[in-house]
Amino acid sequence: MPDLTSNCAAIVSPNPFWLASAPPTNSGAQIMRAFDAGWGGAVWKTLGQPIQNVSSRFGAIRWKGASGVGFNNIELITDRPLETNFREIAEVKKRFPKNAVIVSLMVETREEWKEIIARSIDAGADGLELNFGCPHGMCERGMGSAVGQEPKVNERITSWAREFSTIPVLVKLTPNVGDIRPHGLAAKRGGAHGVSLINTIKSIIGVDLDRMVPMPRVGGASTNGGYCGAAVRPIALHMVAALAREPGFGIPISGIGGITNWRDAVEFMVLGAANVQVCTEVMLRGYRIVEDMIEGTSSWMRERGFQRLDDFIGSAVPAYTEWGDLDLNYETVAKIDASTCIGCQLCMVACHDGAHQCIHPSPDPAVRVPVVDEAECVGCNLCQIVCPVPGCIDLVPVENGFSPATWNDHVHGGAALRPKKGAH
Ligand SMILES: Cc1cc2nc3c(=O)[nH]c(=O)nc-3n(C[C@H](O)[C@H](O)[C@H](O)COP(=O)(O)O)c2cc1C
Ligand code: SF4
Ligand code: SF4
């Protein structure tokens, strides 16, 4: 059995699967059930001055029968008394000394940070996560993403936390910025031991067209909320990878955003995350999803011969590059496997209306398998994406006689580019 022990910024947990700060980590009783189910760590629902929440507060995108492909909330931080939270943190740590309990924090003044950090450490927290990400409600009060969007403020508050803390400090970043890198670097300058990302994306999930009110509806009005769930995973993956390959960054990343299963988790880790955190998928399907994450990751590691997480963390980062460094002479064409094709012709419609009009009906009217005109195919992938039969369409490399050449090679060194297809 491969060793799943995780070390993120010196916070050690039995596996890299943590619950993100959110409703599944609202109370000690919940977190203890989660640890019994197999979660390696949990980031406690953000503590600060307890708030009053609105009703209702969640919304979701339902798409082709799947509920919660994208999820939205206008919930704030904890609404429970701080004494209760700290008592429960101590209870959880007593019963589960090996699991990681990270306390998420959001307060305003230097004195408040000092006090709440001391109380978190006294309660037995293994680490702190500074919530600089909440994009609704708290930012109007000068906290959350209002801090995360201002590198100077981020750096200053992080440095306070470092001054007051004897345990590791993670800074949770907001994705509501044009470029994540200055914000990760600001946290590093402030002394953060690591960063976690992403928090939720500012959004409106939809509109109730009968009442003419955006959702989720609070009486006759609504407000922008935070978007999360599977739909945000590509954005989160990009931001994690952008920081992982940023020269001079070099502190651990806890990857969050749209993780639903072991494969998603591994994708974050190969793009540079030391571990992962999950919220929406647990809200929708329960703590039990961690079983798939543990079993799936372990068996993938066994197949690949990996003994421990460090054997693969970051291994896809070198392959993430700028567009100008991609090989323009690399060429593929679509090939249809006639033995598995069911003749639905979805590929033909997609190629005709959305690509390069190079999949045609078979000349034999009795045959439903379409034909690819390889001389015209630009290898865009669209047909493969719409094909309902896995593996039926493959994108096969073409030997075109041209040496690899990037746009940068071409512009700066005059490297020869293959003739364009489909541009007549
Ligand atoms: C209902 C809800 C409440 C949340 N509350 C918090 C919070 O208190 N503190 C925090 O740092 N993040 C909070 N988040 C953000 C999550 O921790 C996480 O960063 C985000 O949802 C992306 O992960 P996911 O796609 O797995 O949900 C909340 C998310 C949801 C859906
Ligand atoms: S979409 Fe796939 S299964 Fe359908 S006709 Fe095209 S190749 Fe065949
Ligand atoms: S790869 Fe693109 S251009 Fe080629 S057949 Fe498929 S959809 Fe058409």
Image: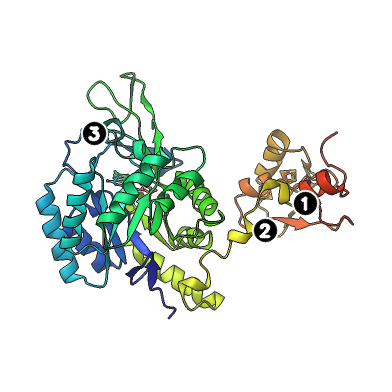
Q: Is residue 226 above or below residue 323?
A: above
Q: Tag on residue 333?
A: 1
Task: Judge left or right: residue 315 versus residue 9.
Answer: right
Question: Can the viewer see residue 193?
Answer: yes
Does the Cβ of the disc 2 residue fall within 8 Å of ligand 2? yes
Task: Judge left or right: residue 292 versus residue 387.
Answer: left
Q: Secondary structure at mark 3?
A: loop
- Which residue type does callout 1 highlight? Val
Residue 158 % position (x, y):
34, 49
Q: Secondary structure at mark 2?
A: loop
* Badge 3 or badge 2: first in the primary sequence: 3
Q: Residues within 10 Å of mark 3 (few under 14, many from 20)?
A: some
- Which residue type does callout 2 highlight? Thr
Q: Residues within 10 Å of mark 2 (few under 14, many from 20)?
A: few
Residue at the image point whose x is 23% and y is 33% from the top: 56
* Badge 3 or badge 1: first in the primary sequence: 3
Distance CA(mark 2)–CA(mark 1): 18 Å
Q: Nearer the viewer, mark 3 or mark 1?
A: 3
The residue indicated by pointer 2 is 340
Q: Secondary structure at mark 1?
A: strand
Q: Nearer the viewer, mark 2 or mark 1?
A: 1
Residue 270 % position (x, y):
53, 62
Quadrant assignment for the N terminus: bottom left
Residue at the image point whose x is 42% and y is 50% from the top: 257
The residue indicated by pointer 3 is 56
* Badge 2 or badge 1: first in the primary sequence: 1
Distance CA(mark 3)–CA(mark 1): 50 Å
Distance CA(mark 3)–CA(mark 2): 48 Å
